[in-house]
Amino acid sequence: MTRLQRLRQQVKPGPLLGAAAYFNDPIFIEMCSYLGFSVMWIEMEHSHITFAEAGNLCRISQGCGLLTMIRIPNSSRENVLKAAECAPDIIDVPMANSPHELHELTKYARFAPKGERGFFSVSRAVKYGTVSNVPAEQQKLNDDLCLMAQIETTQGLASLEEICSVPDVDIFIGPSDLAASLGVPGQTGHARVQEAGVLVVRTAKKHGKLVAVGSMPADYKLWVKAGVDVLFCTNDTSCLRIGAQVVLQQAREAVAQITEQEQLAK
């Protein structure tokens, strides 16, 4: 049983709530732990976070008590291995359009007999070489690490049953790219996107998978009703933008109010 599965059993009803770190900055991660988030997503597909930085963010996040996911750029051996040595709780691979990506992910992330993961004897994943029973530690890592495949294209939808049939890989839904692939870019609330998303959740659940999603606020209720297990509901950039917008608007209103009063007083 993965660490995500164990935490999921403890937190019900409703999904685990998560946030995403797009910056190499520990403050947001620590703040999220104080606020009560359960999961932290470290973004490497679109951001400029390096593996060295991701490893440090993992230390901080897990040290704060957050379950931690790294989204890697793709399922190449190099990306999977380097992410695995950072010792996250979850590795997510984007653009999973066929079972091939899932088999690659499993092959490189799991030790034998489940996969062909290479052994680096001094990484964080194996406590820098301090473990006394290496075979037992490898099997524990096989059990603890959650692997996720991201469904976010029409190709992924077309292979949904096959993808969900791959053992030991859970599912992540990417509504924004899914909307673009379905011909309605930017419209995550469009009926086509919502219907596809609900289908992914139902199919994944039928195969005993956990399901995560990255969601806009307008779509939170849809995903909660659909039964997702992890709801990533914000990120560092959005929090900064929204906070800046709020105070800028408040300042503009104050300036306008005083200016109007001064004009009336003349």
Image (cartoon, rainbow, N blue to C red):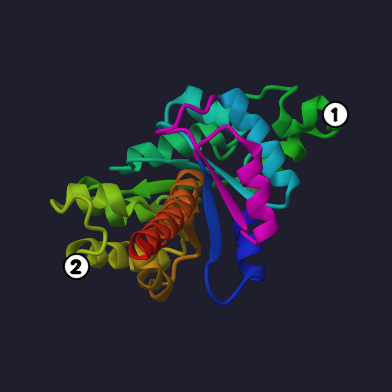
Apparent side of residue 234 relative to residue 130 in the rendered image (left or right): left
The residue at the point 58 percent across, 49 percent down is: 40
Q: Which mark is residue 55?
A: none
Secondary-structure class at tag 2: helix
For residue 117, what is the image quadrant? top right
* Residue 107 % position (x, y): 49, 34
Q: CA distance from mark 1 to mark 2?
A: 53 Å
Is 162 a magenta residue? no
Give the residues drawn in magenta, as a range.
Answer: 22-50
For residue 199, what is the image quadrant? bottom left
Q: How many C-alpha atoms fall within 10 Å of the one at disc 2: few (<14), some, or many (≥20)? A: few
Residue 114 appears in the rendering: yes
* Residue 134 % position (x, y): 77, 32
Please state which of residues 57 and 75 is positioned toward the viewer in this rendering: 57
* Residue 173 % position (x, y): 37, 54
Mark 1 or 2: the one toward you: 2
Q: Which mark is residue 130?
A: 1
The residue at the point 39 percent across, 73 percent down is: 221
Please state which of residues 17 and 69 is positioned toward the viewer in this rendering: 17
In the rendered image, which residue does mark 2 sit on?
191
Apparent side of residue 20 relative to residue 45 in the rendered image (left or right): right
Residue type indicated by callout 2: Ala
User: Can you say which quadrant of the picture contains the N terminus?
Assistant: bottom right
Secondary-structure class at tag 1: loop
User: Can you say which quadrant of the picture contains the C terminus?
Assistant: bottom left
Residue type indicated by callout 1: Thr
For marks 1 and 2, the one nearer the N-term is: 1
Is 29 a magenta residue? yes
* Residue 101 % position (x, y): 37, 37
Residue 117 appears in the rendering: no
Up-down relation of residue 21 to residue 125 (above or below): below
Up-down relation of residue 184 to residue 192 (above or below): above
